[in-house]
């Protein structure tokens, strides 16, 4: 089978042929296939041998997607489903049009530093939220005008909540 | 055996996270029963799981749980605990709480309230330092009454200056001010942050020492007038005044400087009638002059590095001191051996402005092996609450030399995986591999400069990328096909086992696609 995986900003094609007893032939982006053996030690923890080289591959799910940890590196990835182009398009919006400022983590709104109608610079502070006892200034994703402001001091916000929209 | 003759038979641990667990372990080793307390956010925390008894305090916010001294004393009385260990943070430096314990005939494992009042407030400590004849940074020795007074003090000592919360710690309520223009904003920010974090808005000003090293002396004092210093810890690797890496000994402290700093620290502790464990912090300039910074009247986060190089267990000693035993050694009996280094592992994202990253730990592989100590309060499946400090664990390496300790930490970091949330493990790889750090060319501004200079991206090698791609594809293949949705259940990919049915399902799906 062939699986498309987006990792490190690139879409790669991984072709896997299953043999017996955890053996595979694997080829990336059409390059010559290599011998692979794989054993799952426990959920998410894989001992992988690629052409004799040994790797410990750990996979973990998080709110942002799946992440592979290999050789001390953290590699988030996404499996591309060729049938769905919608998800890809929405993730590659340019700097045109309105841009949301969303909370990167759950917390409490401490201060709002801008008003609706304000013209702001890119990276100008818009909202200050407090989480885990730290104050964090959320900055404007682009230069433009604040067209919406949904943050009020004292309000609790969840990760991903849109706090402001800059156009 | 002397350990069995303890007068304290049960200790309430008024804390959470790794330090609660660390204290709990010490109690176990001494044959002392433990009482844990917890907030609603911590019912499933490790310290609650491991304790002999555990009692709920209240809702998640610390002000309604871990800071409720009255509730904690109630629990102590109800459970029959003879002593309370406060850990660090929360009530550990609260003199009123220490006195309330005394009033309830429950031993507070720490200094008496009077010593805390004399040293715990940074402004009073500066007065005490003057009285003990210790060098300190120029600046105010009292809280600033107004912004005008702040301007006056700052003009007097000259910019740049540092604003600090008198009740502060961990960089909260602290602002560096480079010119008159910035003082007003920094002053109100520091006051409000101090008020929220410590319940006191008192701030003071001191001269900012350029590129100082942060070096601190651990002391221990018993209740019979004996006081010793246990050498230094260097904590110069900081971000926003929060320690990130600590080590012992310091690369710049020689025998003579260690003795002089140790004597100054002991003098200060004695002058305040201090008992139990404490830390005297200094700034050290390029010429190895040292200036008193503040005293922390509690056990420090970074105490393990001192434990490793002295061979002592500070929590055991705290408990022994609290039950009236004299220190089992004198100053001459203290010797340092080897090198220890600690990384503070936080739930935060160094690649994205160090935003806190609370949430569920979906995968956890912890390091081990020779010379590695991990003090942690986490487990796979634990949900890191957003209400508290985002520290997950302390990874500590001990080796014969500094170089070997660094190599050991790097090795352990490669073993360590915390999945599901972001952590700063990658940051430690960068610091420990940095030439300046390896040469001990560090000061309290080192890390901020390094972060600006080297950017945040870490290059992945093509080899490990290929392995990751194959692993990802394998797990995708094992993903159980879910009758419900076209994509199956994405959330379970990494839980899957490579069984035949997973592959059949994948093949079936593949067939559907073709």
Image: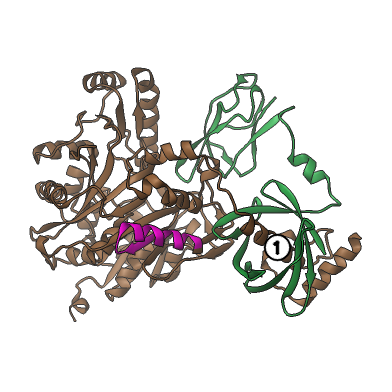
Chain colours: A green, B brown
Q: Quadrant of residue B159?
A: top left
Magenta span has B401? yes
Q: Could you say where residue A137 lies in the image, as x and y percent from the top left?
A: 52, 33
Whether residue B141 sits left or right of residue A109 in the image: it is left
Q: Is residue B219 above or below residue B176?
A: below
Q: Secondary structure at mark 1?
A: helix
Q: Could you say where residue B499 lies in the image, as x and y percent from the top left?
A: 74, 76
Q: Could you say where residue B136 lies in the image, as x and y percent from the top left?
A: 18, 36
Whether residue B81 sits left or right of residue A105 in the image: it is left
Which residue in the protein does label 1 denote? B470
Q: How many marks?
A: 1
Whether residue B316 sits left or right of residue A54 in the image: it is left
Range of residues picked out in magenta: B396-414
Which residue is located at x 78 percent, y 76 percent?
A: A19
Which residue is located at x 67 percent, y 72 percent?
A: A38
Decide which of A99, B511 is in the foreground and name it: B511
Quadrant for the N terminus of chain A, please.
bottom right
């Amino acid at each position: 089978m062939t699986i498309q995986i987006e990792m490190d900003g690139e879409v790669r094609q991984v072709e896997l042929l299953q043999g017996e007893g955890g053996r595979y032939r694997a080829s990336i982006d059409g390059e010559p296939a290599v011998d692979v053996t794989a054993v799952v030690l426990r959920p998410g923890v894989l001992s992988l041998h690629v052409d004799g080289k040994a790797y410990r591959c750990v996979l973990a799910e998080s709110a942002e997607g799946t992440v592979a940890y290999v050789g001390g590196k953290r590699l988030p990835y996404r499996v591309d489903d060729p049938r769905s182009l919608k998800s890809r398009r929405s993730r590659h919006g340019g700097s045109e049009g309105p841009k949301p400022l969303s909370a990167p983590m759950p917390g409490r709104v401490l201060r709002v530093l801008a008003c609706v109608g304000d013209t702001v610079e890119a990276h100008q502070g818009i909202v200050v939220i407090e989480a885990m006892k730290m104050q964090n200034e959320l900055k404007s994703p682009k230069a433009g005008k604040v067209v919406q402001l949904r943050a009020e001091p004292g309000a609790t916000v969840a990760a991903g909540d849109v706090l402001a929209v800059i156009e | 055996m002397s350990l069995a003759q303890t007068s304290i038979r049960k200790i309430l641990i008024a804390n959470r996270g790794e330090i609660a667990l660390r204290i709990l372990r010490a109690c176990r080793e001494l044959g002392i029963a433990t009482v844990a307390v917890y907030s609603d956010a911590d019912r499933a925390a490790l310290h609650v799981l491991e304790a002999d008894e555990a009692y709920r305090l209240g809702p998640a916010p610390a002000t309604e749980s871990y800071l409720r001294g009255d509730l904690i004393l109630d629990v102590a009385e109800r459970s029959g605990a003879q002593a309370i260990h406060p850990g660090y943070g929360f009530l550990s430096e609260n003199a009123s709480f220490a006195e309330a314990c005394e009033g309830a005939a429950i031993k507070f494992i720490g200094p008496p309230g009077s010593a805390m009042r004399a040293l715990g407030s940074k402004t009073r400590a500066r007065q005490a330092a003057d009285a003990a004849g210790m060098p300190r940074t120029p600046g105010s020795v009292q809280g600033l009454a107004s912004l005008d007074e702040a301007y006056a003090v700052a003009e007097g000592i000259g910019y740049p200056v540092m604003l600090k919360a008198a009740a502060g710690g961990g960089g909260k309520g602290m602002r560096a001010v480079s010119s008159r223009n910035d003082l007003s904003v920094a002053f109100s920010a520091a006051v409000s942050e101090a008020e929220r974090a410590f319940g006191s808005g008192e701030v003071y000003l001191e001269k900012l020492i350029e590129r100082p090293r942060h070096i601190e002396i651990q002391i221990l004092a018993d209740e019979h007038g004996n006081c010793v210093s246990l050498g230094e810890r260097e904590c110069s690797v900081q971000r926003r005044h929060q320690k990130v890496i600590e080590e012992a000994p310091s690369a710049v402290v020689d025998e003579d400087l260690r003795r002089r700093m140790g004597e100054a620290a002991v003098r200060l502790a004695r002058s305040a009638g201090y008992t139990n464990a404490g830390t005297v912090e200094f700034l050290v300039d390029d010429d190895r002059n040292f200036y008193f910074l503040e005293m922390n009247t509690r056990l420090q986060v970074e105490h393990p590095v001192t434990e490793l190089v002295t061979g002592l267990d500070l929590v055991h000693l705290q408990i022994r001191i609290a039950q009236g035993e004299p220190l089992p050694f004198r100053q001459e009996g203290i010797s340092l051996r080897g090198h220890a280094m600690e990384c503070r592992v936080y739930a935060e994202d160094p690649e994205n402005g160090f935003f806190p990253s609370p949430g569920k730990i979906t995968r956890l592989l912890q390091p081990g092996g020779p010379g590695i100590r991990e003090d942690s309060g986490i487990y796979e499946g634990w949900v890191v609450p957003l209400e508290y400090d985002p520290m997950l664990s302390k990874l500590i390496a001990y080796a014969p030399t500094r170089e070997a300790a660094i190599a050991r930490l790097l090795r352990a970091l490669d073993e360590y995986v915390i999945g599901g949330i972001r952590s700063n493990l990658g940051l430690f790889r960068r610091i420990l591999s940095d030439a300046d750090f390896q040469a001990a060319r560090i000061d309290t501004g080192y890390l901020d400069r390094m972060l600006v200079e080297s950017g945040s991206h870490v290059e992945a090698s093509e080899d490990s990328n290929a392995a990751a791609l194959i692993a990802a594809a394998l797990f995708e293949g094992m993903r159980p096909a879910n009758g419900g949705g076209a994509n199956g259940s994405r959330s379970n990919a990494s839980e899957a086992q490579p069984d035949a049915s997973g592959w059949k399902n994948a093949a079936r799906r593949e067939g559907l696609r073709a």
